């Protein structure tokens, strides 16, 4: 064989091996293409919304009020005897404490305290017994209550998108509306011949 023919056969064999490997490569090839958007439909959901409102108003109600009173009785108030007797008794008790000029001071303090206590007791005695009465009086009070109103609102949860790629129609759901086209991932997988 001539050298030229051997070289041609070697190159042809090498090309056949490379071509066979390329055809038999089972690994998929992928890439990003763009598909044309033909329809976008919002997905709408009805939502029930609660709105609380507080209402207040004035009302008049009747309450029972307790009155307690003591009335002055002038007939009991005219005597100075209780004050004098209290002073004497306080002086006697005060003289039991201390010695020398301290005893005189304690006696004077005893006279003043005894007279004051007796005078207060006599003044209280001049008032009659307590008298209790009850009376119903109108009182304005504020009343409040909370009411809840319900409304139905429409909320868009997403978009149903129809697009066309390579002459076929496809559907997908998206969070926001796309433009005129969307990216699609295209995977090419070779088929095996039998």
Image (cartoon, rainbow, N blue to C red):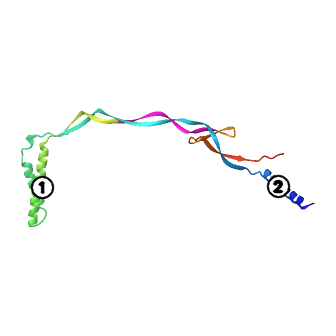
- Tag of residue 15: 2
Gap in angstroms between the C-alphas marked 2 and 1? 135 Å
Q: Is residue 153 rendered magenta in the image?
A: yes
Work out whether 96 lies above or below 29: below
Left or right of residue 90: residue 48:
right
What element does badge 2 sit on? helix
Left or right of residue 25: residue 1:
right
Crowdedness near tag 2: few (<14), some (14–19) or many (≥20) residues, C-alpha within 10 Å: few
What element does badge 1 sit on? helix
Work out whether 102 lies above or below 122: below
**Residue 45 falls in which quadrant of the image?**
top right
Name the magenta segment's main secondary structure: strand
Residue 185 percent across, percent down from the top left: 66, 46
User: Which quadrant of the figure contains the C terminus?
Assistant: top right
Q: Nearer the viewer, mark 2 or mark 1?
A: 2
Residue beneath label 1, please?
A: 113
Q: Which residues are magenta?
A: 144-162
For the point 53% across and 38% down, the residue is 156
């Amino acid at each position: 064989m001539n050298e030229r023919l051997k070289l041609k056969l070697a190159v042809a064999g090498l090309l056949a091996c490379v071509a066979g490997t390329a055809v038999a490569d089972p690994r998929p090839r992928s890439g990003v293409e763009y598909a044309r958007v033909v329809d976008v439909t919002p997905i709408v959901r009805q939502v029930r919304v609660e709105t609380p409102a507080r209402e207040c108003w004035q009302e008049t109600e009747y309450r029972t009020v307790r009155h307690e009173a003591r009335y002055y009785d002038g007939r009991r108030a005219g005597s100075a005897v209780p004050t004098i007797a209290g002073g004497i008794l306080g002086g006697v008790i005060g003289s039991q404490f201390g010695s020398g000029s301290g005893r005189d001071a304690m006696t004077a303090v005893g006279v003043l305290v005894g007279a004051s206590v007796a005078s207060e007791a006599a003044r209280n005695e001049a008032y009659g017994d307590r008298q209790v009465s009850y009376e119903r009086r109108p009182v304005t009070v504020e009343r409040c209550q909370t009411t809840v109103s319900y409304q139905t609102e429409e909320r868009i949860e997403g978009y149903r998108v129809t697009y066309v790629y390579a002459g076929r129609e496809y559907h997908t759901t998206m969070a926001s509306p796309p433009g005129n086209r969307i990216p699609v991932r295209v995977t090419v997988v070779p088929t095996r011949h039998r």
